Image (cartoon, rainbow, N blue to C red):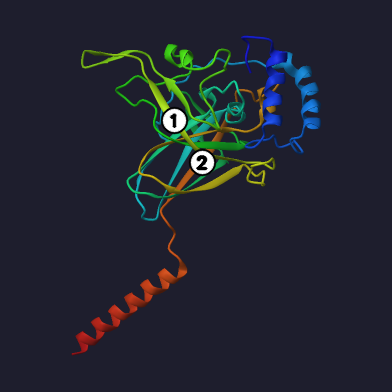
Amino acid sequence: MNNKYSPTSALKRKYVDILKTEKHISLDNQEGTNMKNAFRYLSAATAIATTIISLPAMAHVGYTGRNFGTFDNTYSTATLSGQAVTGNYGWVDGTDSDNGDSHKLRPYRFTLAKETNVTLTFEQATSQVIDHLGNVSTSQLGLKPGFSLYQGLAHLAPMKADYDSAEISVASRALGTEGSFKALADWSVGNDPGELSGTPLPASLSFFKYIGHAYDGTGFGSDGTPDGKVSHTFMNLKPGDYSVFVGGTDYFAQEASNPDLSTKYGVTATLVAGVVPEPEVYAMLLAGLGLMGAMVRRRSMH
């Protein structure tokens, strides 16, 4: 979505990008990614172009309530609930050449103290959620989740938070783009100038190095099961800080006529770090405990 130039030409370019270069993403109702389908969707794009709107990027990137924690290579899990994304298209909108608006996604973070495997799972949910103004509402089921994993973090307090329409963010990306978010590549977003203990701080960029992605659905590169849940394991992640951006994958949910354009869709997130012990390891542990118990009983008898 972009109101800065012809909506028809912009939307045509979106569909060409998605359908010609679809190595990573395709819509759930798309059968294949050949040019015959591209022309078919171009016709649909022309018909709905005038009904597509763009909401301004206004939310700041933050991790409040969405920090999984710090992990090493010891098997452990963490689950975060009570979160929601606005609209059902934020992630897929970042797969084309004019980027997406990070306001339509939710960022999560975690830190690795040692190299290890990490499995991330995001699933539709419903719960009470509180927005940045303190308003309480109930999130809805129906999210078609997609997510991307990056190495790097957005600015944290006391630094000012990053956002798409910050002057430095706009200056750092191509003209005519909707926002800063890129679902399938490295990207950056910045903040405003501030101060720390009376010392002026210039605006600066946060950088996100793309690692991988996964999305719910049946299109090319999806998890193959459109059930409102997506999961993926990333092997041998290096120590460091990581960010995960989660949003919807329904490209047509951007239509102005969509009554759920601003609906809050609930999501529950789970992280599993470390290697799950093999059954043989459990057997050896149990055998060892049994042997120790027998030795203790034998000593007590003597």
- Above or below residue 211? Residue 258 is above
**Residue 277 occupies quadrant:** bottom left
Return the x and y of residue 48 as percentages of the image width and height.
75, 18
Return the x and y of residue 264 as percentages of the image width and height.
57, 29
Query: Most extreme residue toward the left, as rendered?
Result: 302
Q: Nearer the viewer, mark 1 or mark 2?
A: 1
Quadrant in which the C terminus is drawn = bottom left
Three-letter residue code for mark 1: Phe
| Dot placed on the residue nearer the N-terminal end, 1 or 2 | 1
Q: Residues within 10 Å of mark 1 (few under 14, many from 20)?
A: many
Q: Secondary structure at mark 1?
A: strand
**Residue 222 occupies quadrant:** top right
Q: Secondary structure at mark 2?
A: strand
- Compute the Cα span from label 1 to label 2: 23 Å
Three-letter residue code for mark 2: Thr
- Residue found at x 52% / y 40%: 212
Residue 228 is left or right of residue 241, and the answer is right
Find disc 1 in the rendering and name its residue: 208
23 or 283: which is nearer to us?
A: 23
- Residue found at x 58% / y 13%: 176
| Residues under numbered marks 1 and 2 in contact, where contact means CB atoms less than 8 Å apart | no
Camera sees residue 67: no
Return the x and y of residue 301 as percentages of the image width and height.
21, 89
**Residue 61 occupies quadrant:** top left
198 or 168: which is nearer to us?
A: 168
- Residue found at x 44% / y 30%: 208
Return the x and y of residue 231 as percentages of the image width and height.
55, 46
Residue 17 is left or right of residue 85, and the answer is right
Find disc 2 in the rendering and name its residue: 268
- Above or below residue 191? Residue 210 is below
Residue 109 is left or right of residue 293, and the answer is right
69 or 190: which is nearer to us?
A: 190
